[in-house]
Amino acid sequence: MLGAQRPYQRGFTLIELLVVIAIIAVLIGMLLPAVQKVREAAARATCQNNLKQIGLAFHAFHDARNGLPQGGRDGPTRTCCNWNATEPNRDGWNWRYHILPYIEQSPLFNNTSNAVVHATPLKLYFCPTRRQPQLYGSSTRCDYAGNAGNRFANGTPANLGSPLDGGSAQGVVIRGDLKPITLQSISDGTSNTFMVGEKALHPMQHGRDGGDNEAAMNAGWDECVVRIADQTRPPLPDLNAPNPASGTNWNQQFGSPHPGGVNFVMCDGSVRTVKFSVSLTVYQAAATRAGGEVFSVDNL
């Protein structure tokens, strides 16, 4: 009918709309920590699986070569990291290169271009909590380091240098010119000894820190390749890792971006999370392969 009025339709007032928005914001605030925990749990599981696969590769390498892969070394007549330019082979490259055939990366292992090998990021070598596989300049990196024991001398030692320089008296990943370590020689027990763990790296030092400034599969014997159980402090959360405003820090510690602890694969292939609050005595004992220490891995 002409002139009839429409029925009245009540809408939201501004106050009611603001209340609804506030309720939604509260719910999102409550859900976000739960979502973050789920994501971190998934990322931690992926990191642990990375270490598990690395551990299996170490064992496969050991079975084929009768010794564990080593930590590399610099060229006999050169200083840091110049093996690529002066040596006719890749013997001085570190364990990350030598286990490639055992992590289904034979084509990369056999690639004749050093530049291609150094510029190929591998998902297995990155902790997803910390960062995604990527390049820094013309080379990639790795978030995992071999266990060199609890003492370490950086630099370019001469052939057959001291045990301290080569780590031959302590860890399981030793310098490339020394006799390889066998699983049978780990008298402390393979289930009680670290093999490879996460390295400490401050979020502001990616690609810059002295332990993260070289290609993942480079030649050399330094903090990019191996870490130690420091005698003065337990493993570090990434936010507590060194972060100098200038200059290069040579970070020797194991550490992690995960809350609560750092992941290690033991020499028996099992993966454990070591608490940031672990006793220094237990921590150092787990880093030596033949120290004769008695401890429970449950205290890690």
Image (tube, helix red, strand yellow):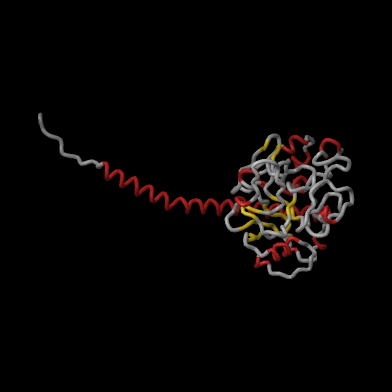
Left or right side of 295 for 30: left
Place residue 119 in its image quadrant. Answer: top right
Q: Residue at x 65, y 60 (%)?
A: 272
Q: Position of residue 83 (x, y in %)?
A: 83, 40
Q: Is residue 256 above or below residue 117?
A: below
Q: Quadrant of the C terminus?
A: bottom right
Residue that lies at the very extreme toward the top in this rendered image: 2
Q: In the depicted view, which residue is nearer to us: 215 or 150?
A: 150
Q: Compare residues 192 and 123 and report the one nearer the observer.
A: 192
Direction from residue 23 to residue 180 in the image, left or right: right
Query: What residue is at 88 percent from the left and 40 percent from the top?
Result: 77
Percent x, y of residue 174: 81, 53
Please state, as top left, top right, bottom left or bottom right, where the N terminus lies in the image: top left
Residue 21 pos. (x, y %): 34, 45
Task: Classify 230 as above or below 123.
Answer: below
Q: Image height check: is 295 above or below 130?
A: below
Please state the horizontal and vertical placement of residue 269, each as a whole percent of the image: 71, 59
Q: Nearer the viewer, residue 237 or 115?
A: 237
Residue at 29% x, 43% y: name it. Answer: 17
User: How many numbered marks have been drawn onto this rendered protein structure?
Assistant: 0
